Image (cartoon, rainbow, N blue to C red):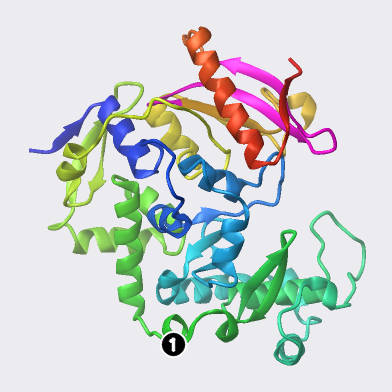
Amino acid sequence: MMLKLSNKEIRHLWLHSMGLWTAPFGKPDVHGIIKDLGFVQIDTIQNVSRAHHHILWSRNRNYREPMLDNLLQPQGSVFEHFTHDASIIPVEFYPYWTRQFGRLRKWLDGYKNYQKILAHADLDGLKQKLEKEGALCTEAFDTKIEGKKKMWSRPPHKVGLDYLWYAGELATSHRINFRKFYDLSHRVIHENHFDQTVTDKDQLDWLCNAALDRLSFGSPKEIKEFWDASTRKEVDDWILDKRDTLTKISYQNSDKEWIDCFAPADIEERLTNLSSPSGQMRLINPFDPAIRDRNRLKALFGFDYKIEIFVPAAKRKWGYYVYPLLESDRFVGRIELKADRKKGTLNVINFWPEPGVKWGAARRSKLDAELDRFKRLANLAKVVWLT
């Protein structure tokens, strides 16, 4: 018989898989958190704390921003590359990532306008300069944008550096004030990982297994989109090949519909080992892996969420940078925050309880405690409610 899971059970399983189930305290194992999640998305916007720092902090309140920088350099235990977006990935996954280098190179080679700019980048010259001078940021190069400048226009050297980075010839050496420094990959990635050869078939097998392991349950589409390093057909073929080792399950979504999907062979053991939730209020970053797939989020929790940073102000339903509020196993509200670094304040711009959720003194106290912790991550002195 197919294993059937209630909506409550599937929510608990998902939050546990995403590291948002147990109490977020203790000694931070930052590399362990990233490995458990698979990757952590990088984002440039520093609304309060950048997304990658916030995601890690959500799993351990003792995390502080320099800890991630230390993993990139000097430890070299993570590397940066592209999943569905720019991400931090454990370096031991590097041998399983070479197919992604080839896929992205081929994808970029298919854009004629991109190739026109790339033709002026002098790729060999860029690599020779790095070979001679060591890790450099884009300011060390001086090619100019030709023609009319557009919003996403980049000078040829920037396009060239990124092309070589996507293709795996360059790697991120380190960052200073979030500014990226490029270097030749063999000087960034330890030779134990750099020289390890894994066949394309074995890479695909690892990627699909690793995706489903971290999802705990998923459709072929969700398995494909986890890393975004394979095609849907490749995943379908993998599922067909592994049909005897995967478990078919059905879960009830927030609309009480039954959804069929796949799970790892040990799914029942995972369910048995689920502990009780911490019950803590958590500020969730818009780019957190637990909510990145908005369709999955809505299906599991009935929580309809969209980040509106690219929506014109007059058309926003909520606000510029709005954080979902998770308590135990449900989303109880959303809150718009902004750091004022000159004044040292974490400003609450707006707050919305979810429909049907009562906000009494106890729940409000949990939120106040979470805001107080969050301000300390960003080195802010106090929380100010402007609403």
Question: From this viewpoint, which residue is outermost toward the right?
Answer: 147
Foreground residue, 107 or 54?
54
Q: Could you tell me how many numbered marks the image carries? A: 1
Relative placement, left or right, of 114 versus 167 is right
The answer, for residue 359, to whether it is visible in the render is: no
Name the side, left or right, on which 1 lies relative to 263.
left
Snapshot quadrant of residue 314: top right
**Residue 347, position in %: x, y?**
74, 26
Which residues, given as a range, are shown in magenta? 327-353
Rendered image quadrant of residue 200: bottom left
The amino acid type found where label 1 is placed reads Asp
Element at label 1: loop
Would residue 141 be found to the left or right of residue 97 on screen? right
Q: Residue at x 29, y 25 (%)?
A: 8
Residue that carries the numbered disc 1 in the rendered image: 195
Q: Position of residue 381 (x, y in %)?
A: 73, 32
Which sits in the foreground, 211 or 230?
211
Residue 27 drawn above or below residue 203: above
Per the image, is 64 magenta?
no
Q: What residue is shown at x 47% (from left), y 43% (from top)?
A: 60
Residue 380 makes an appearance in the image: yes
Q: Please say if 282 is above or below 153.
A: above
- Residue visible at 56% across and 24% down in the picture: 369
Where's the C terminus, which quadrant? Answer: top right
Q: Residues within 10 Å of mark 1 (few under 14, many from 20)?
A: few
User: Which is nearer the eye, 291 or 279?
Assistant: 279
Spot occupied by residue 280 in the image (x, y as percentages of width and height): 44, 27
| Residue at image coords 46%, 43% | 59
The quarter of the picture where the N terminus appears is top left
Q: Tell me which secondary structure the magenta stretch mostly adopts.
A: strand
Q: Position of residue 15 (x, y in %)?
A: 37, 37
Q: Is residue 336 magenta?
A: yes
